[in-house]
Image (spheres, grey):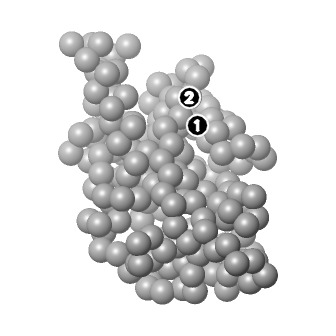
Amino acid sequence: MPLLDRIIFVTGNAGKLAEVQAILGSYIKIESHGLDLEEIQGTIEEVSSAKCRKAAEILKGPVLTEDTCLCFRALNGLPGPYIKWFMKGIGHDGLNKLLAGFEDKSAEAVCTFAFSEGPGSEPIVFQGRTEGKIVCPRGPSNFGLLLGWDPIFEYEGETYAEMDKARKNSISHRYKALEKFKQFLETYNKQEE
């Protein structure tokens, strides 16, 4: 295994790229490449692994893919890995209306990164979770219409959209998953020294 000093993060989303670079950028060189990858139906881990496998085949090198889920406790984890499609179809207001008949507004933000060394390499999954609740939208949508649920996910009194980037990058589900990936990289690269 060669030393891993650069990786292709598969995203066309400038907001996600900025967060990953802010968290990992001083540790490893992050290049980005936007691919429109088919998403299978399945568990969070199955969806993430399948996307990573396909990206490694296409890009022929070490890749990192990311899936973000928003899981409502009252709906037994839905919308989960399908949040992108729920956002596109019903937006912030629709997501709030899904919970209108429930007292329980709790939710879990889940970020799953999958890493592959390249074609034929089985992906390794790194997951971070942050507990919060769903609220009426507050603050700007930093990721655009399709993925911008930051204004409705509240953690300790502030929505993700209301938080400054430094605070969000120190407590978010994405940060927690990337911390696990950083620990993996340390072990991975020590094997090469």
Task: Point out which mark residue 123 bears.
Answer: 2
Image position, residue 117 (x, y; %): 47, 25
Q: What is the C-alpha distance between the residues marked 1 and 2? A: 6 Å
Residues packed near mark 2 inside 10 Å, few (<14), some (14 to 19) or many (20 plus):
many
Amino acid type for the residue under numbered disc 2? Pro
Task: Tell me, yes or no, if residue 127 can be seen here.
Answer: yes
Give above or below for 176 relative to 107: above
Q: Residue at x 25, y 17 (%)?
A: 190
Q: Secondary structure at mark 2?
A: loop
Q: Residue at x 58, y 23 (%)?
A: 122
Q: Is residue 119 left or right of residue 128?
A: right
Residues packed near mark 1 inside 10 Å, few (<14), some (14 to 19) or many (20 plus):
many
Image position, residue 52 (x, y; %): 58, 37
Residue situated furthest front in the rendering: 103
Q: Which quadrant holds the N terminus?
A: top left
Q: Is residue 156 left or right of residue 123?
A: left
**Is there a contact, CB below 8 Å, between mark 1 and mark 2?**
yes
Amino acid type for the residue under numbered disc 1? Cys
Q: Secondary structure at mark 1?
A: helix
Labels 1 and 2: the sequence-earlier one: 1
Image position, residue 87 (x, y; %): 67, 72
Image position, residue 160 (x, y; %): 43, 72
Q: Residue at x 30, y 51 (%)?
A: 23
Q: Which quadrant holds the C terminus?
A: top left
Give above or below for 113 relative to 75: above
Q: Residue at x 70, y 78 (%)?
A: 103
Residue receiving disc 1: 52
Task: Tell me, yes or no, if residue 142 can be seen here.
Answer: no
Q: As rendered, which of 146 and 101 lies closer to the eye?
A: 101
Q: Which of the 4 quarters of the picture holds residue 56?
A: top right
Q: As rendered, which of 148 and 58 lies closer to the eye?
A: 148
Q: As rendered, which of 189 and 167 lies closer to the eye?
A: 167
